[in-house]
Image (tube, rainbow, N blue to C red):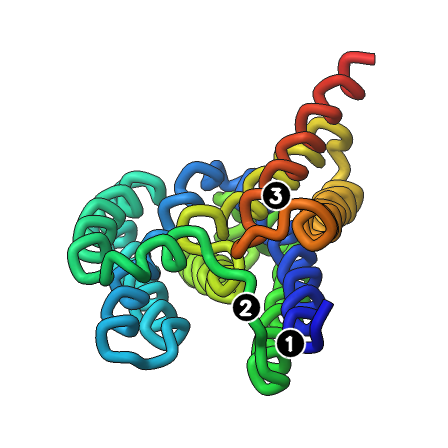
Amino acid sequence: MPGGQGLLFLLALFFALAAGLVGCFALMKRMVLASDVISHLALPGLGLAFLLKINPLLGGAATLFLGTLLVWQLQKKTGLATDATIGVVFAAALATGAAVTPREDLIEALFGALQHISLLGFLLGFAATLFVVLSIFLLKDRLALSVFSPELAAATGVNIARIDLYFLLLFSLTILVGLRFMGTLLASALIILPAATARQLTGKLSHFLLVSSAAAVVSVFAGFLLNVLVLKLSTVGPTIVIFSALLFGLSLLRKRT
């Protein structure tokens, strides 16, 4: 594997670790379907960046985080559930993104690309995933409390609205790291599937976090290996998601036995 793609592979492993952790709380907060929508918020920014010939991740980051803040504000002011507010923003984001993205760049925007990454790009991505991992561990008790007992969380001084915002931003940052090689359609799959797999195998929070992250890392490793050795596709996202789905299927069998 060439040096640039080697760095991309390492970044994908770090992304998997962060995605596995974020996915656990997304599952507990019943945001797994909403998570698939959040990644689409980056599509208008990606499309505009392609049109302006600038780094697509810059455009994707702008609309992703603006959309996340909009979702949070709508949730606070309207009282709608998170998935409902995300759905409202999603419809506009998807339509706008499809309209402004050049046709020749649309596939890359949707499914990502297996491309070289600079050392600076790797370091920025690594810093982002490290920030997500550390933040999740620092916030995990308050996140869990806000999910299972909002009244107790509020009584103990936990600002639930602020915790929700922190989590949405961490969620979006994780998605942003995965956009490069997973695209807007598949970036959230590595948040949804490993967490669902872990949920079938354990109910203890510490084990839940560990198994989910391990499942995500194994999926990335196997997906890259299959693509490099056999398929040689221009994007690795589909093979990663296929392996992740296979692990989920195996977890169902394991639970039944």
Cβ atoms at labels 2 and 1 below 8 Å apart: yes
Q: Is residue 94 left or right of residue 58?
A: left
Callout 2: SS: loop
Q: Residue at x 76, y 17 (%)?
A: 253
Q: Which residue is mark 1?
A: 4
Q: Which residue is mark 2?
A: 115
Residue 72 vertical placement versus 53 (above, below): above
Residue 225 vertical placement versus 14 (above, below): above
Question: Which is more N-terminal, label 1 or label 3?
Answer: 1
Q: Position of residue 157 (x, y in %)?
A: 52, 60
Q: Residue furthest top?
A: 256
Residue toward you, 67 or 226: 226
Q: Which residue is mark 3?
A: 239
Q: Position of residue 77 (x, y in %)?
A: 21, 53
The local crowd at label 1, few if under 14, some if 14 to 19, many if 20 or more residues have their Cα within 10 Å, is some
Q: Position of residue 182 (x, y in %)?
A: 51, 55
Q: What's the distance in space between the residues labelled 2 and 3, CA to CA? A: 16 Å
Q: Is residue 235 left or right of residue 52?
A: right
Going by the numbered disc 1, the residue's amino acid type is Gly
Q: Is residue 4 left or right of residue 31?
A: right
Q: Position of residue 42 (x, y in %)?
A: 34, 61
The local crowd at label 3, few if under 14, some if 14 to 19, many if 20 or more residues have their Cα within 10 Å, is many
